[in-house]
């Protein structure tokens, strides 16, 4: 694995204890230019991790706290009248950055979410009559609280589909929590340094893109996605009644990119089924829509994906 | 300015002409009686006859409803035009309140307008909204009435009815008493009865008056209702009503019977409660109990039988079970990856490069060692050992059994 990746992880580890899967997921998003959705209950260092990562990358970073009264112009920008020049001038919103942290995205109403969705897809912002292209790299890291909590709007499926990965953040282990408590009480947290330049990041992306994916692995990935749409064809009758809609074609596209990054992070220059398995849940868990029966019986998309991975023949 | 003789003469001529000019209407008045007693109703009939249809006239005839010597009610008011002649008739009910010779003298206001004024008001010309009138006050013919004194406040024809719903009650049990006066006369001068009996609590309702105007006075009913509550026996005195009877032309007295109400002793508290003998709390066998039990058991068995339980089959396989059932190294690697346990990472990396069957057995053993190994930080620390857990199970079983016993005992006791 690249020394640069190690360096980034080391810098992030200065302020974040554990959460390796979340950090790997964020790096995959960075290397593949995919947007990331992070879900977890409050207090699990979601925002801290994203902020630490941006600082270690030396990229432009802006954070928007989504609230129910947020307006699209609050994130995109707006035309403002300049009385001195008797003219309108553009005030760019926080979306004009490299790494946008949309904190608690599901607290904003659908109007704002849709505005962000357009930016994520087009990487372009239109204010008034003028369009602005966002300077690469641009990717959105959004955090959200579980929808069961009060005062949140569930993200629409179309927007969820635009997130490459959905990372579920869980509690730290007891050992990690002990370390966190010790660090905070002893005030031993350190300053994060930028350890990579834009040019080096571009090189890393090129390297990841060059990771070899065997044709069998490519077929395997397509089979996995297909199995979520037609489980009975893969003798997965037991989960067929729980799936309303399977994974979209965007999953296949993102999977082809993400598995390369996963293999790279694991120190390899070729992809194996294990790499696919490592990232499959994060790729598909927010893109499979379950039936009412599944929700009633407490079946999660993660369990569905596990069954699919166990059932589809491994090359 | 000195008035000229010519103008003065002209004014005199006009005044005399106006004074003796024939009015286009004529009032007449009559009474159905000339001699009455105090409070005896007299019907006054006023009539105004026009020479033509009288379309330009409006009559305002509203004599005072009450004076020092009389009370007055409007019985009816009619207007009719027959043969192009308009006639207005007014009928009043007159109650004299003092004796002696009375002269009934009222006045009416004759309001005259013009066709132009009506037209202007109807079409709204010059923003005219109301019709112009010229008013003339007319003193109506006087009616002479001889009023004799009478030794009663009530005059007319009445009957008295006093009704009790029961005449024998328990102490503090209410008795409904109603007093009804029915008839025709000066009901408006009636004074309500009052009931005051020592040792009896009296609850009175509002007086109910129902009467209409008739030619002999107010005709209808006067009702008073009372509730009488007493602890001991009591006597209800007679109700008496004096009135001047117009048919017999003398004072008569109506009287109800004296009633003696027997009041028994009140109920004791014990009498109001069911006797304990009626409640049989002892348990007795009933075949219905068997029905309840069988129904409960049938429901429980059917519930178990039809309960959908695919989850246990599909999703509850343990990690150890999955490891043991893995048929290849790749499948084992997949299981370990999906477990999400980062301790398997080195093993997974090694398995990625191995495909031998011997490696599978070894890898399974190694993986199971991880699963079985009790990591100090991964096992929840509790105070419960094997005995503690056994005690918890027994406690739950005991709780379920006692709940069932309580349920059935409750059912039996209700029976």
Image (cartoon, coloured by chain):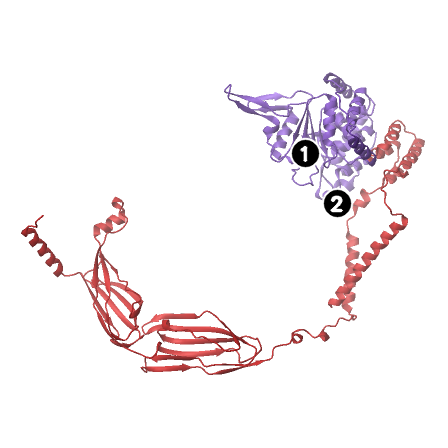
- For image coordinates 40% across by 81% down, the residue present is B254
Closer to the chain start, of discs 2 and 1, is 1
| Mark 2 on the same chain as mark 1 | yes
* Mark 2, residue position: A297
Residue A162 vs residue B373, the one in the foreground? B373
Chain of the residue displaying label 1? A
Chain of the residue displaying label 2? A
Q: Chain A is drawn in which colour?
A: purple
Left or right of residue B236, residue A68 in this image:
right
Split into 4 quadrants, where in the image is the C terminus of chain A? top right
* Number of marks present in the image shown: 2
Left or right of residue B33, residue B389 in this image:
right
Place residue B14 in its image quadrant.
bottom left
> How many other residues sit within 10 Å of disc 1, few (<14), some (14-19) or many (≥20)?
many
**Picture disc at residue B415:** none
Report if the CB atoms under discs 2 and 1 are less than 8 Å apart.
Answer: no
Split into 4 quadrants, where in the image is the N terminus of chain A? top right
Q: Residue furthest top?
A: A199
* Mark 1, residue position: A104
Q: Position of residue B286 (x, y in %)?
A: 77, 70
Q: Colour of chain B?
A: red
At mark 1, the secondary structure is loop
Q: Distance between the residues labelled 2 and 1?
A: 28 Å
């Amino acid at each position: 694995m690249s020394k640069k990746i190690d360096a980034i992880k080391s810098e992030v580890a200065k302020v974040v204890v554990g959460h390796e899967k979340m950090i790997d997921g964020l790096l995959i998003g960075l290397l593949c230019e995919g947007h990331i959705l992070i879900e977890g209950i409050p207090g699990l260092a979601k925002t801290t991790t994203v902020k630490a990562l941006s600082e270690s990358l030396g990229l432009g970073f802006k954070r928007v706290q989504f609230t129910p009264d947020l307006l699209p112009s609050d994130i995109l920008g707006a035309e403002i009248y300049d009385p001195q020049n008797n003219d309108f001038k553009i005030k760019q919103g926080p979306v004009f950055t490299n790494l946008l942290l949309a904190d608690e995205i599901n607290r904003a109403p659908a109007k704002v979410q849709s505005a962000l969705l357009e930016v994520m897809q087009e990487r372009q912002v239109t204010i008034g009559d003028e369009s602005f292209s966002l300077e690469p790299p641009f990717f959105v890291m959004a955090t959200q609280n579980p929808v069961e909590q009060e005062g949140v709007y569930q993200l629409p499926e179309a927007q969820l589909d635009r997130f490459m990965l959905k990372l579920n953040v869980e509690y730290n282990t007891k050992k990690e929590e002990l370390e966190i408590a010790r660090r905070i009480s002893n005030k031993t947290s350190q300053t994060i340094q930028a350890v990579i330049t834009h040019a080096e990041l571009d090189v890393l992306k090129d390297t990841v893109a060059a990771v070899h994916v065997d044709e069998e692995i490519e077929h395997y990935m397509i089979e996995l996605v297909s199995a979520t749409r037609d489980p009975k064809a893969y003798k997965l009758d037991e989960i067929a009644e729980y799936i309303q809609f399977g994974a979209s074609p965007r999953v296949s596209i993102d999977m082809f990119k993400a598995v390369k990054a996963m293999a790279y992070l694991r120190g390899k220059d070729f992809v194996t089924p294990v790499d696919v398995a490592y990232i499959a849940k994060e790729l598909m868990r927010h893109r499979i829509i379950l039936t009412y029966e599944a929700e009633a019986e407490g079946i999660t998309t993660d369990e569905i994906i596990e069954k699919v991975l166990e059932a589809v023949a491994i090359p | 300015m000195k008035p000229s003789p010519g103008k003065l003469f002209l004014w005199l001529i006009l005044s005399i002409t106006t004074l003796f000019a024939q009015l286009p209407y004529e009032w007449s008045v009559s009474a159905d009686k000339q001699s009455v007693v105090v409070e005896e109703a007299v019907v006054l009939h006023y009539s105004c006859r026009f020479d033509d249809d009288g379309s330009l006239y409006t009559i305002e005839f509203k004599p005072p409803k009450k004076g020092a010597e009389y009370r007055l009610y409007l019985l009816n008011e009619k207007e009719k035009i027959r043969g192009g002649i308009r006639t207005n008739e007014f009928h009043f009910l007159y109650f004299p309140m003092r004796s002696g010779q009375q002269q009934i003298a009222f006045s009416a206001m004759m309001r005259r307008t013009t066709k132009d004024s009506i037209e202007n008001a109807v079409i709204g010309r010059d923003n005219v909204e109301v019709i112009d009138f010229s008013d003339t006050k007319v003193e109506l013919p006087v009616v002479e009435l001889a009023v004799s004194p009478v030794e009663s406040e009530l005059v007319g024809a009445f009957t008295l009815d006093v009704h009790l719903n029961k005449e024998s009650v328990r102490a503090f049990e209410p008795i409904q008493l109603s007093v009804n006066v029915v008839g025709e006369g000066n009901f408006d001068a009636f004074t309500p009865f009052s009931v005051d009996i020592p040792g009896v609590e009296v609850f009175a309702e509002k007086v109910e008056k129902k009467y209409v105007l008739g030619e002999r006075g107010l005709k209808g009913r006067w009702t008073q209702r009372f509730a009488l509550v007493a602890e001991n026996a009591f006597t209800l005195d007679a109700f008496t009503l004096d009135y001047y009877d117009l048919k017999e032309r003398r004072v008569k007295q109506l009287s109800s019977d004296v009633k003696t109400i027997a009041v028994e002793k009140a109920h004791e508290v014990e009498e109001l409660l069911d006797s304990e003998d009626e409640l049989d709390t002892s348990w007795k066998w009933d075949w219905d109990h068997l029905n309840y039990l069988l129904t409960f058991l049938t429901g429980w068995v059917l519930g178990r039988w039809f309960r959908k339980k695919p989850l246990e089959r599909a999703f509850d396989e343990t990690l150890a079970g999955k490891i043991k059932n893995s048929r290849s190294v790749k499948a084992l690697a997949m299981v370990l990856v999906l477990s999400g346990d980062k301790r398997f990472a080195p093993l997974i990396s090694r398995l990625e490069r191995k495909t031998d069957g011997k490696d599978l057995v070894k890898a399974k053993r190694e993986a199971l060692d991880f699963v079985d190994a009790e990591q100090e930080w991964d096992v929840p620390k509790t105070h419960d050992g094997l005995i503690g857990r056994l005690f918890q199970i027994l406690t739950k079983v005991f709780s379920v059994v006692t709940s069932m016993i309580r349920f059935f005992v409750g059912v039996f006791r209700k029976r």
